[in-house]
Amino acid sequence: MTRSLGPALTQALVERFSQRDLAARLGVALPFVTVDADGRPHPMLLSYLEVKAYDARTVGLVMLARSRSARNLAERGTGTLLAVEPESTVYVKLRAVDGPLPVEGGGDYGLGYFLLEVDEVLEDAAADWEAGMRITTPIRYAPAPTLEEPWARATLAALAAPRARA
């Protein structure tokens, strides 16, 4: 059963997406869904390395600047980030403020930065008749990056502070 938590991340979600405990979250994938030109959902996978909450209403995201997801986000201005993990399942509806902006040091990798605003946060939980059913593991990938790779350093630098065109 899904319920709205309102137009902002909870403090627990700000902390989860803050990158303060990034090493513990490496290897966990976060589905991100945009809308394509035909109005259909277009999914991709991100990692906690590529997403950062600056506060309850502001999120930064780094992805391939020339990807379909980046084009969809730039053209239609909306996307939904999913965190499907044992502690909670949330859907964060986001609106693009700006992007894709260049990522310094990320040019060789084709990275672009988006500044996003939180529109709505939904929390999903088992209905009463689904008692006992739950998510047991997050979506995982391997090998997790070491954070020493040049693309990872460029991503972290791009997400260090929120930015938009003047």
Image: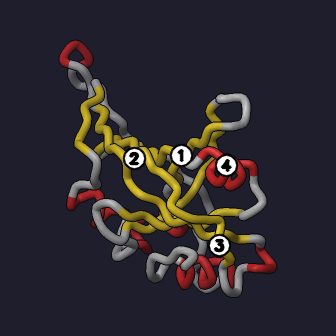
Residue under numbered circle 1: 78
Please tell me whether mark 2 or mark 3 is closer to you in this view. Answer: 3
Instruction: Report the amino acid beneath label 1.
Output: Thr
Residue under numbered circle 2: 92
Q: Residues within 10 Å of mark 3 (few under 14, many from 20)?
A: some
Task: Using the numbered discs, state the Cα–Cα distance from disc 4 to disc 1 in whole angstroms.
Answer: 9 Å
Give residue 101's mark. 3
> In the picture shown, does residue 42 fall above or below 157?
above
Please tell me whether mark 2 or mark 4 is closer to you in this view. Answer: 4
> Which secondary structure lies at badge 2?
strand
Instruction: Report the amino acid beneath label 3.
Output: Leu
> Which secondary structure lies at badge 3?
strand
Instruction: Answer whether labels 4 and 1 touch (C-beta < 8 Å).
Output: no
* In this rendering, position of residue 32 left or right of residue 59: right
User: Reading the chain from its start, which is encountered first: label 2 or label 1?
Assistant: 1
Residue at image location 35% in from the left, 43% down from the top: 90
Residue under numbered circle 4: 75
